[in-house]
Image (cartoon, rainbow, N blue to C red):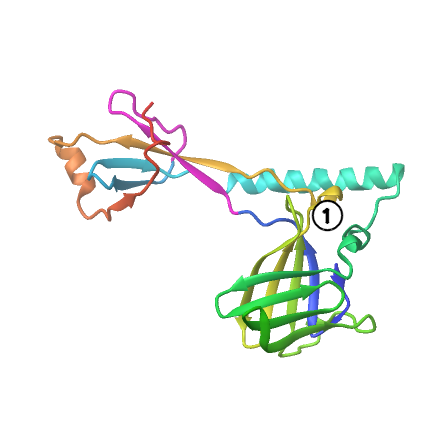
């Protein structure tokens, strides 16, 4: 779904979340025993303690996500049968005539819904330099599909608690991607946030004085990765 802009394509999308990971440490007295054939890697913490860590099978979450999206689509269709839902355009109409800002060092960025996207340089709260990166035009459709070299795109995502520009990136010369968090979009079934998928990396503590030759052999030629974690969150089971 896209708003009509000249030189500024706008799309709606769900809040993008990378899978979250947590590390669970296990003592030598109570090691973790993987049920599946998990990939393992030798790691060490800042104190030099070695751990054999088992990486989770992240691929399994794709199936869960697909089911979640399918259920969301079914819920949307069912809701349409009962009530008339507001469209995403109608939901974000409350930010019409409002502007939002993001400050990134030398440059600041201003996005005014249904108006424009500007790159600004401020000195003493005064604009001393500006570049217009996109201007709203209701007569132009699918601007970012017309091979314009200076096209910028604004993504609207469901996210709490307030409307803010969460990120802006120049992916190529004069081409920007802006992400605007809009909590009002969360009212629409297709924009409701997915629950972050949590994956656990299980790490078995290795004896400091390794005398078992089989363990020593397993360490030869292994790239050691250092674990940096919050000591308050670390605990052996």
Q: Is residue 78 above or below residue 142?
A: above
Give the quarter of the figure containing the N terminus.
bottom right
Q: Residue at x 60, y 77 (%)?
A: 130
Is residue 35 one of those drawn in magenta?
yes
Is 57 placed left or right of 95 in the picture?
Answer: left
Image coordinates of residue 4 in percent, x first then y, are 77, 68
Q: Residue furthest front?
A: 124
Question: What stretch of residues is rendered in magenta?
Answer: 18-37
Q: Residue at x 58, y 68 (%)?
A: 125
Q: Residue at x 31, y 42 (%)?
A: 228
Image coordinates of residue 219 in percent, x first then y, are 19, 41
Reading the image, the residue beneath label 1 is: 185
Q: Quadrant of residue 69?
A: top right
Q: Is residue 95 visible?
A: yes
Q: Is residue 57 visible?
A: no
Image coordinates of residue 111 in percent, x first then y, are 67, 64
Q: Main secondary structure of the magenta part?
A: loop
Q: Quadrant of residue 160?
A: top right
Between 144 and 158, the one nearer to me in the picture: 158
Between 190 and 101, the one nearer to me in the picture: 101
Q: Is residue 120 above or below residue 73?
A: below
Give the quarter of the figure containing the C terminus.
top left
Mark 1 neighbour class, 10 Å CA radius: few under 14, some 14 to 19, many 20 or more: many
Is 100 placed left or right of 91 in the picture?
Answer: left
């Amino acid at each position: 779904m896209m708003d009509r802009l000249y030189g500024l394509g706008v799309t709606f999308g769900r809040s993008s979340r990378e899978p979250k990971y947590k590390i669970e440490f296990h003592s030598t007295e109570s090691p973790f025993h993987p049920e599946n054939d998990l990939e393992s890697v030798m790691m060490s913490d800042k104190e030099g303690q070695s751990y054999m860590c088992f990486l989770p099978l992240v691929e399994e979450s794709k199936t869960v996500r697909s089911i979640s999206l399918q259920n969301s689509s079914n819920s949307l269709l069912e809701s349409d049968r009962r009530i008339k839902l507001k469209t995403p355009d109608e939901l974000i109409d409350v930010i019409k005539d409002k502007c939002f800002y993001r400050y990134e060092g030398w440059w600041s960025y201003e996005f005014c819904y249904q108006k424009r996207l500007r790159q600004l340089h401020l000195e003493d709260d005064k604009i001393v330099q500006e570049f217009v990166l996109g201007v709203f035009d209701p007569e132009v459709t699918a601007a970012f599909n017309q091979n314009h070299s200076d096209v910028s795109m604004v993504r609207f995502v469901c996210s709490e608690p307030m409307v803010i520009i969460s990120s802006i990136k120049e992916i190529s010369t004069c081409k920007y991607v802006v992400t605007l968090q809009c909590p009002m979009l969360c009212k629409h079934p297709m924009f409701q946030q997915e629950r972050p998928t949590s994956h656990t990396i299980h790490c078995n503590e290795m004896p400091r004085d390794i005398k078992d030759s089989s363990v020593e052999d397993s360490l030869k030629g292994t790239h050691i990765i250092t674990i940096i974690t919050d000591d308050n969150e670390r605990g052996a089971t």
